[in-house]
Amino acid sequence: MARQLRLVLLGKQGAGKGTQSVRLAAHYSVAHVATGDMFRSQAAQGTAFGLEAKRFMDEGELVPDEIVIGVIEECTAPGGPLGDGFVLDGFPRTVNQACELDRVLAGAPLDLAIDLEVPTDIVLDRIAGRRVCESCQRNYHVNSAPTHDWTCDTCGGRVRQRDDDTEEAVFRRLELYEQETRPILDYYRARQMLTSVDGVGEGDEVFERLVKVIDEHLSA
Ligand code: ADP
């Protein structure tokens, strides 16, 4: 059997990484691994690790590298979500994390890193209307709400605004994106692993663009 897709999806907060990576993972039958979702779910369960991560998240700060890298390392254990094919969303977020990812995936490296490009004024608009299911993390928008009274269409969980989608935390996250995450684009570009995809437009349209780029890459 052909080896499964191993993809990193990069982009600003609100670029659509969460929504598109869930769809891509289903399309290519691989795991969806989102560090932000993992931290939120641990925080909702009240674990010590989740509550520690939440302190950073609510301020819009990055969770320290040693914590995040430890989590990713656990995911690469045999049978873990990064053991075979995956779409990775929210990791890496610093050049150090990108190096560490290469290290832990040494035997089976990434196929591709995609930068989902969306201008800042559009992401700000999207984040202001973003609502998320507390249970399964599905994303909604005030303009495309769940069918019944902010109850998730997928799992029945409560759909609400994220604690870190306050104006202050969003500005801090975008600032950190420029300082810490944008340099990762050069890291992958230098290794001929980077492709950019226009993330502006309807979700279905963006999804088709992504699939086209990935399929071209896989058949090259
Ligand atoms: P967004 O992309 O909108 O910031 P995420 O759900 O990806 O949303 O991440 C939410 C928060 O989780 C981040 O602001 C950060 O505090 C923490 N986080 C997620 N992934 C990482 C990571 N790779 N490194 C450090 N912190 C992270």
Image (cartoon, helix red, strand yellow):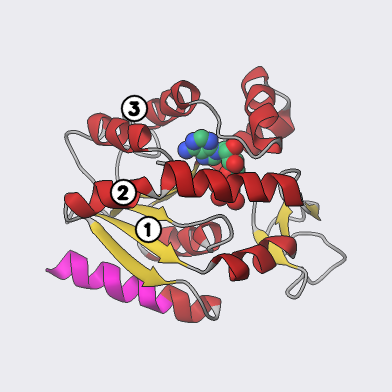
Q: Residues within 10 Å of mark 1 (few under 14, many from 20)?
A: some
Any atom of ligand 1 within 8 Å of the CB at mark 3? no
Q: Residue 128: x, y in percent?
A: 73, 62
Task: Pick whichever of labels 2 and 1 is earlier in the sequence.
Answer: 1
Q: Nearer the viewer, residue 152 or 181?
A: 181
Judged from the image, the secondary structure of the residue bearing numbered disc 3 is: loop
Kind of residue at badge 3? Ala
The N terminus, quarter of image: bottom left
C-alpha separation, residue under disc 2 versus residue under disc 1: 8 Å
Contact flag, marks 2 and 1 (Cβ < 8 Å): yes
Q: Which residue is mark 3?
A: 77
Q: Residues within 10 Å of mark 2 (few under 14, many from 20)?
A: many
Q: Which residue is mark 2?
A: 85
Q: Residue 48: x, y in percent?
A: 67, 18
**Quadrant of picture, ligand 1:** top right
Q: Is residue 94 above or below residue 131?
A: above
Kind of residue at badge 1? Ser
Residue range of the region highlighted in magenta in the rendering? 208-220
Judged from the image, the secondary structure of the residue bearing numbered disc 2 is: loop
In the figure, is residue 33 to the left or right of 55? left
Question: Residue placed at 60% from the left, 71% from the top?
Answer: 122
C-alpha separation, residue under disc 3 versus residue under disc 2: 13 Å
Residue closest to the far top: 48
Q: Is residue 214 magenta?
A: yes
Location of residue 180 (image quadrant) = top left
Kind of residue at badge 2? Gly
Location of residue 215 (image quadrant) = bottom left
Determine if residue 44 is in view: yes
Location of residue 132 (image quadrant) = bottom right
